[in-house]
Amino acid sequence: MRFSLIVDGTPIDLFQDETIELNRQYKDLTDLGKVMTDFTKSFTIPATDVNNSVFSNWFEENVLLTSWNQNIALDAEIHLHGLPVFYGKVELQEVNFIDGLPRDYAITFYGQGKSLLTTWGEDTMVQIDWSEYDHTVDDGVVEASWTGGLNSGELVWDIKDYGIGYVYSSDNVQRNLRKENVLTYKNLRPSILLKKVVEKIFTDYDLTIGGTLLDRPEFTNLFVTPMNTQGPYEDPYQGRLYNFEATNTAAITLSPNTAWSGNTRLAIGDTSVYDPSSLWDTGAYEYTVPKTGKYTFEITFTTISGGNPFTDGISIWVSKNGAKTKFVWFDDFNQFYVKFENKPWRVYLPCDEGDKISWDITYVTQNPIDLNATVKCVGSPYFSNPVVSMKYTFPNTKITEFLSSFLKTFNGIVVPISETSYELHNLEDWYNSGTIKEYTEYIDFKSINHKKVEIPKKVMFKHDDGQTTQSQEYFRQTHNRLFGDVEFSPEVDFSTGELEIKSMFSVLPLTFTNAVTKTGYVVGATQLQIPWVFDAEIKGTKHDYILFYFQEPTAINEIVYLGSNQMSELPISSPFSGIGQDAYSVAFGLESNVSGDLPKNTLYFGFWNEYISRLYSSRSRIVTMTAHIPVGEWLDMNLNDVIAISGNYYILQKVTYDLTTEKGKIELMTYPNVDVLEITSTSGSGITWGDPVSADAGLTFVRGDFVKTGFNALSDGTNWVGDPDTDGDKQATPLGFSTVSLTDALANVLALNKGTMWWDTPQTVLVDPAGATILYDQYQVLGDESYYTFDPMSGTITIEESGNYSLHFAGTVDVQGSVRVKTAIMTDGSELPNVSITEGNHHHSINVMVTNVFYAGNTITVNVSSDDGSSSPEDFTRVYLTIQRLTQ
């Protein structure tokens, strides 16, 4: 017998006519469920005493298995002429019975290794031991990480905006980067080198990893930000140590007061019930915000006594830094009693570090009122533990899902070298490193089949957009695609299906911070490039993995503080490794760098171009033939060998080989050195293409204007990339974004293509039959400002582009007399439907909403008038008018 099978050290009995036919195919190298072996072989072996002993008489249903069971692999070897040539594992599949007796076993031999799915199973990224990356963090550590001072440069605390809403202004505004302790480690997250994440996946399971993929220059300074939750880093096991509870020991007495006049600080909370971070001041009756973020406060009145229905009124305020932010108001004391006794009033409030939160009251009463109350913070950001556990930065992604997505993104394969050793390669790099082997003499030319390669009708490369950020959504609305995506359809008549490569990484568009005034007017540009990881309401968004290039600190002209230290230079988190045309890009398609040449080394052109171009070659085909290959030659075969037959070159797709007959069936794919689509220059963001030409190696169909347009360089206002023009020089328009200053109370009404005018303080308006226009002192636009023009001081919005718009006016009016107040949204002096009518001498809330088609030149105002012919000056407070464009 020419071969034998050794399992668990025992020579296995084989059937006399047993053959050994082994399968090898390159597709196994891209599927983690099949990356186990250079080849596989299924055997049927007799149920002899020898074989029964090896498999512990598994055919007996009641047998007690101790040291081995059917789910454990057994070491195995295949010998040829008495010499071991293959090492691997055997898996027991089944036993067949005849007449009630076991006849044979079905087993599978896996050469060299085992399925990587078996290695990692259902394990997640959180279960990897990341403790070598655990560290203590403060602002000094953040700065040191920018120059390689944290884990030898494998970790960085780069600068992204995770929902803080940074602005840059010489005025005194919130979240201002010019102020100390706005940009701090508490508002950031750590990021880790992508190649180290991939290496750790293998080494943590005692696997050796090598190959050429991770050594490519594209992986230098290529980082990933893992996000287990939205917002800055939080330690989920530290609890919310910024919460508190305080109450008063004695009742608060409100003396008789016959007029609504001013505020009085409520002396609630002279005793702290729970305050682990010592944030409640029992003397000033206020809470100091320890960390920028969203907070939830409650006030509960446990005792309310005194007060007369219908004659006494009360208004409770939540104040931030002495300014009224949220309030409830009752002109009937009995309503207040029913609403609030032992029933908490909950307030949601975005706050900045250092803000002072207190409770104030305005009241009118004929008799004393006694109140007992409790105040609480029941929702706050997680405590920023300076000891960072890196495992808690990772989402609960399966290891196999992460690695599979990584391989898809970079057209990578896993090549098993031994049971515990693997290599990672880009598929084209791996093919290019193969050896050319002459097979002409082995081929049986009597029967050869050429089959057309089925090519996809559409090719798409996409990154994951996670919870879409404001900049991503703006980019999508502006360019009808996500930043970095590629989609093209070559000009062919016959195709099938679609090829979609989608990674789990998120790639964020460029965002630049403009210098603004306190009212949001842009007064200049800055060098501050800070990615936005928040939505239109400045709420942090979650992305499992953000992919970016970390660019080391460069000098800045702006005044920016990290903690309490003014910085002279800052790093950049960017989709690009640099500003030149030879920089690397994490986008699949071409995108503008704004501050330099268009980076042409995209993920597509770096990792996929040759593969896709050959797939669409006019000479691409699948060739199937039989061959008589000597055992020694077959043993020396590698799946990346280039097979030469009669002067043509092929790559191996699949080989089925019988060691006993030395006969094999080989499936090959042509490997033409086809001319590929390439970019010869992007200097000055002008794109010059090297168009593929027909040659002996065939013509690729990845060419032409339709394909070029799919690579997404932006329009120059006249031509898209790929459109015909006279000089062949297409321009990519730079696209940046501007941060703006927001008023906290208005954040929830601002969104893309929305504009708002507001006036926070009271304005007195003469309400009479003629009517008067509501005025404003500030305005803000988020999105495209070209649709309308704002004039706050005249209270006017002018429509610049016809379309469908929605309008919302809101505010309060303190009616002193008996006048019936009508509030209406006007266009060119004409009243629109859905007016508001209020009457009665007390505070009223006003809400008017209208959706209407407006035309360029229309003017919009809000008019207040008396509906009963009377006249009275009335105070309007916190008024705002919001407009949003609904259609193009």
Image (tube, rainbow, N blue to C red):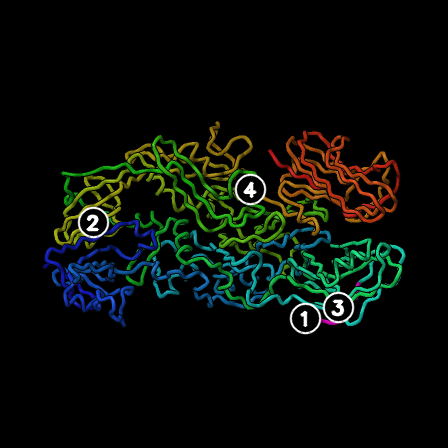
Given residues 175 and 537, the one toward you in this image is 537
Residue hosting label 3: 269
Q: Is residue 737 above or below residue 97?
A: above
What amino acid is at disc 3?
Gly
The secondary structure type at the circle numbered 4 is helix
**Compared with residue 482, is residue 404 higher up or lower down, i.e. above or below?**
below
Label 2 amino acid? Thr
Q: Pointer 2 and pointer 4: residues touching (CB < 8 Å)?
A: no
Mark 1 residue type: Tyr
Residue range in magenta is: 266-273
State the quadrant of the C terminus.
top right
Between disc 2 and disc 4, whose residue precedes? 4
Residue 656 is marked as: 2
Q: Are marks 1 and 3 in contact (CB under 8 Å)?
A: no
Residue type highlighted by circle 4: Phe
Q: Which residue is mark 4?
A: 475
> Mark 1 and mark 3: span between their CA atoms?
11 Å
